[in-house]
Image: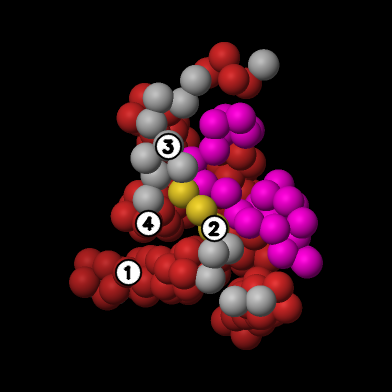
Amino acid sequence: MGEWAKSGLVLLTSVSWLVAYWIFGDHKRWREYYATALFICMWDFISTILTFHYGLWRFERTMISPSHVQADFSIVFTHLLPMGMLIPARYPYKSGWWKQGWFLLFFLAVNSGLEAIFHAAHLISYYHGWNYAWSVALWGMMILAIRIHYTHPIWAWVFNIAMTAFIIWHFKIPIPSLT
């Protein structure tokens, strides 16, 4: 895939998430969801800092995002922020567990599908034992964390700290690399 096509794919994905929020978001109550959106963005920034010198994945250069960090910032503001506000706004809280499960699986399928497309287009590479299956699991945990944070913020913190500790332990991320 050429540079123009890769950049177009990145731009299309970013614009699609912003349009999805514009169409399906609850604009009148955005303040209610803002803390949850910031929570998930913060965890992305934490993972970027923790893995800066020992990356588990890397966003490849495009004309739009010439570095991994710039690509990550773009994803935070055009993907995670809208998703962090869409999930709590549209979550079927009063429905049965099966409808809630399908709702979360929908977001997992969308994000996992995008990840597969980006990986096939060589826009993302995996390192140190990370692979597509781990990315799908991480997307699932992030989506679940968004859901938990909206109604039980403390439990979302506990969940994400445990998840982060497990990833650091399992992938042997050297903590001294933070200095």
Quarter holding residue 61? bottom right
**Which residue occupies the foreground of this view, 77 or 135?**
135
**Which amino acid, mark 1?**
Leu
Residues shaded magenta: 49-74
Q: Nearer the viewer, residue 122 or 113?
A: 122
Q: CA distance from mark 3 to mark 2?
A: 14 Å
Indicate yes or no whether the magenta region holds residue 178. Answer: no
Q: Earlier in the sequence, mark 2 or mark 4?
A: 2
Identify the residue at image location x=70%, y=73%.
3
Q: Looking at the picture, which amino acid does disc 2 mark?
A: Ile
Q: Which mark is residue 128?
A: 3
Compute the Cα span from label 1 to label 2. Answer: 22 Å
The residue under label 4 is 132
Q: Secondary structure at mark 1?
A: helix
> Is the C-beta separation of discs 1 and 2 under 8 Å?
no
Label for residue 105? 1
| The image quarter in which residue 12 lies | bottom right
What residue type is disc 4 on?
Answer: Tyr
Of the two numbered discs 1 and 3 in the rendering, the one whose residue sits closer to the viewer: 3
- The residue mark sitting in front, 1 or 2, is 2
According to the picture, the residue beneath numbered tag 2 turns out to be 124
Q: Find residue 53 and report its horizontal and vertical position in percent.
A: 61, 30
Query: Mark 3: which amino acid?
Result: His
In the rendered structure, which disc, 1 or 2, sits on the residue that comes first in sequence?
A: 1
